[in-house]
Amino acid sequence: MVVSRKKTRTMGPITFRLAIFRWNVPVVIFVYLTLAPVKAVATVASRVEGEYCPLGQFPCGNLSICLPQVLHCNGHEDCQNGADEENCGDNSGWADFFDRTIKRPDLQELPHACFLQQYPESCECTETELQCVEVNLNAVPLVSANVTLLSLKSNAIRKLPEDVFHKYSELLRLFLQNNSIQTVSSHAFSGLYKLRKLSLSQNCITSLRPGVFSDLHKLHWLILDDNPLKRISQDTFIGLKALFFLSMVNTSLEQLPQARLCSHTPLLSWLDFEGNRIETLNFSTLLSCDELTVLSLRDNRIKKLPENTFQSLHVLGELDLSSNRITELPYSLFKGLKSLQILNISHNPLLHVHLGQFDPLIQLQSLGLEGIEIPDIQTRMFRPMENLSYIYFKKFQYCSYAPHVRKCKPNSDGISSFEDLLANVILRVSVWVMAFITCFGNLFVIGMRSVIRAENNLHAVCIKVLCCADCLMGVYLFFVGVFDLKFRGQYNRNAHMWMESLECHIMGFLAMLSSEVSVLLLTYLTLEKYLVIVFPFSHLRPGKRQTATMLASIWLLGITIAAVPLLSEGLFGNYYGRNGVCFPLHSDQQERPTAKAYSTGIFLGLNLLAFLVIVFSYSSMFYSIYKTGINATDLRSRLHKDVAVANRFFFIVFSDALCWIPIFLVKTLSLLEVEIPGTITSWVVIFILPINSALNPILYTLTTSFFREQVELMLCQWQRRSVRRKDRKSLTSSVIYMEAPRQACYHQQPCLPRISIVDTCAKYG
């Protein structure tokens, strides 16, 4: 058996098929018999689903039941007949190819007797087959003329001299891989008129002379992998009239013949040039390859393809152009490839994909577009390919443009999946929790600030305005949760429509407005406090008019920042619809330059500057307070106050850092074109971005001593009124009046040690 060479590759289907093809014939036949029925099922399913099932749903085999795309190939049988879990592997096309190239032999057990009279003792003989594997041979051994299989793998043979196999006219298979062969004489294979399979892979052959295979009229398989062959000509294959499989993987080929490559191999069906250095492909090279069904040019250096390169390949079923340097595909490149079932153009630096690029591929079942940015992607690109069952993109968002395809990869971008807007349960639950905390906290503070008499009315107004801005973030999260529920189980069918919808744009606008107004207000409040503490005797205090003007300006600036991308769609594109949660957190290659520069200016310009101002201001304030308290007589009291101030300032700065530093990092990495997993984006949007909005009510209101004192006073007054109402109905009102307030207030004291409610009650009683 020929040992296949293992190699890691990114695109599975074609690689797996080629590797299997290097095995012996019985194994390949077994695979063919296993997979041939699968293709028949795929063909029937494709026909049925087009007639009966709505877009985005596919049938349960021959049943009239249709299921959404997400329920197919999910590891669980949702159809009664289990048809939704059938045909989940991408085996498109190759069952047909095996059917054309391999005949099923009569399978029978071979006897162990040896019918060879002469052979080395170190070799193993079975009937007329001889295995001389890893026996340290330096030359081709002398064996009986009736040998039909000769395996000389993994030896130390360096040369194949003239007529070395001349007397072995019955030889059918010859395996010479993994030797050190450097020279192959012109007539080394003369006399091998019946040879069917020849493997010369993993040697040191640098050239093959014209006519070296001229006697191999019945050769079907020729494997030349892993040899430093830099050039070949069409005359290299003179005499190979029956050849249907030619593999030249990793042979350092720099160019293919300019003339017709298949002029001497009219039956060539499988051609593999993977892993070479081919830079150009002439339009006449493949003109005579009329029977070609599989062509692999993967992992070469091809930059450009002439428009008529594949025009004569009418029966071509599989074409692999992946991992090259192709920047543009001619519009009519695939014209005439009506039999093509598998096309892989992944990992090419394509700048543009024509709208009708794939229109001629009416039989296509698998399309590989991994690693390719398609900035002008449209549903129209893939609609003509009605039989398409598998498609592979770079981004999950592209799958929304091919809702009629049963299997699309990748399955998720970390935020959304085929089934849901939010990909996992943690995100779905967390978005509601964060929305509730953010909205409730800010609305509570607005209500309490409106009821409680403030020491500084202007500061209280600023805090309430800040809460209004932060509350918008909660509204944004709330609507994310609502639309996640709306699209539950069918998101991919609606993803494209959703990301371009007015609702998505409004949500993105609200999130950006909340974020920017909050940042600007926090900066303003910080600078205001900075002036009061660091310059206590200055007259730089904003009045009512200045405060109102500043607040109005901040809101106007925030609205402008959030609205500009919506008003200039020609420059910004779909700015907010880059992902399912409608927030433009990080850039990608598909984003327009104007949009990329704009978001960079906001996140790494304005917001970063505001963050640095806040950090500097609070550091200066703490230092000023510390210096002021140095002359205090009570060291313990001063130390206690310093620690309290330090803790408060630390948590304010820490919450800002916790929110913005991850966003700065994500934005910076995206500008450096580092691939950012979608899971990071989802966690940042759901958990990190709302941190400030959720914590601001606590940091700027609920933890202040004045606010706590006022709340305790309200509670005390409420208790006193309650007791007085009871006094009117009780005969022992004097006793109740004297004891109840004291006990109620006394039990509150341990919760807030620095403020005595008893004293407060006495003060206001």
Image (cartoon, rainbow, N blue to C red):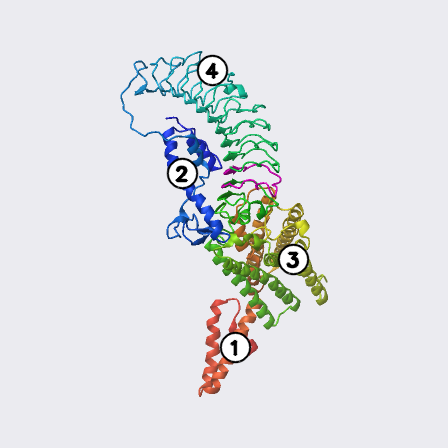
**Tags 2 and 3 touching, CB below 8 Å:** no
Callout 2: 10 Å neighbours few (<14), some, many (20+)? some
Q: In this view, does 447 lie above or below 157?
A: below
Mark sitting earlier along the chain (1/2): 2
Q: Could you tell me how far apart the alpha carbons at marks 4 and 3 are, in whole angstroms? A: 78 Å
Tell whether 345 sits left or right of 144.
right
Q: Name the residue under label 3.
A: 520
Q: Mark 4 points at which residue?
A: 184
Q: Nearer the viewer, residue 685 or 652?
A: 685
Q: Could you tell me how far apart the alpha carbons at marks 2 and 3 are, in whole angstroms? A: 65 Å
Percent of width and height locating residue 671: 61, 44
Which mark identifies residue 718?
1
Percent of width and height locating residue 326: 59, 34
Identify which residue is drawn at 55% across, 64% down.
439
Q: Could you tell me how far apart the alpha carbons at marks 1 and 2 are, in whole angstroms? A: 82 Å
> What SS does tag 1 mark?
helix
**Tags 1 and 2 touching, CB below 8 Å:** no
Quadrant of the image for the N terminus?
A: top left
The boundaries of the magenta stretch are 340-365
